[in-house]
Amino acid sequence: MDNYDEFYDFMEQYIDFYNDVCNNEKNKMDALESDNLKLINEVLSDYQVFVTRAELYEKRRKELFKKIGLDGKTFREIVDMETGVQREELENLFLDFRDAVSTAREYNSRSLEIVKKNLKETGMQDYDINDPACYDKSGNIPERGYSHTNLLNRQA
C-alpha cells in the first residue's frame, strides 16, 4: 500500500483515542454507580469533548482514506488487501481497534442499564436514554452543536 506509514500512524492515533474513550466510558459507569451527581456531571461534560474529538477523527479518517485511495473501505477490507509483514502489523492493529471499540461499547451498555434502573426507580422509565445527543447545562440540545454522531457507532 502506498502511504502505509501514514495510514498506520493515523490508525494508531485513532486506537489511542478509543482507548481514551474506554477510560471515559468506565469513569462514566463508575460515576453512575456512585450516584455522585457532581462526578456524573463532570464525566458527562468530558464525554461532550470526546464526541467533538470523534467527529474530528472521522473527518481526518475520511480525508486520509480518500487521499490514499481507500475511500469507502473498512479497516477489515484494508487489512485483507495486504500481504506479508504489513498484513500482520495491520491485523494486530485491527484487533486492538476492535477491542477498544468493543470495550467502550460494553461500558456504555452497562451505563445505560444503570440509568434505566435509576429511571425506573424514579418512575421515569419511558424516557429515551438511547438518544446520543449532548445536552448543554440547561438540559437543552443545541441544534448547532448536535451532529447526530454517536462515537460508539463505528464499523471496523
Image (cartoon, grey):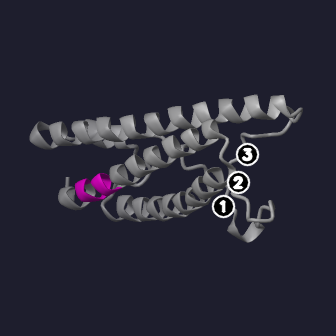
Residue name at image x 82 percent, y 29 percent: 120
The one nearer the camera, 119 or 33, is 33
Q: Quadrant of residue 92?
A: top left
- Label 3 and label 1: CA atoms lie apart by 12 Å
Q: In the rendered image, which residue does mark 2 sit on? A: 133
Whether residue 154 is visible to the viewer of this picture, yes or no, is: no
What kind of element bears circle 1?
loop
Along the line of sight, the residue nearer the viewer: 69 or 119 = 119
- In this picture, which residue range is highlighted in magenta? 8-13
Q: CA distance from mark 2 to mark 1?
A: 8 Å
Question: Which numbered disc, 3 or 1, marks the residue closer to the eye?
Answer: 3
C-alpha separation, residue under disc 2 versus residue under disc 3: 6 Å
Whether residue 20 is visible, yes or no, is yes
Residue 89, image x and y in percent? 17, 41
Structural crowding at the residue carrying mark 2, measured as other residues with C-alpha within 10 Å and reported as few (<14), some (14–19) or many (≥20)? some
Residue 8 horizontal/vertical position (percent): 24, 54
For residue 131, the mark is: 3
Residue 69, located in which quarter of the rendered image?
bottom left
- Quadrant of image for the C terminus: top left
Residue 16 left/right relative to 110 = left
Q: Amino acid at mark 1?
A: Ser
Of the residues shown, which amino acid type is indicated by label 2? Answer: Ala
Residue 147, label in figure? 1
Against 84, is 43 above or below? below
Q: Earlier in the sequence, mark 3 or mark 1?
A: 3
Does residue 78 sit above or below 99 in this rendering?
Answer: below
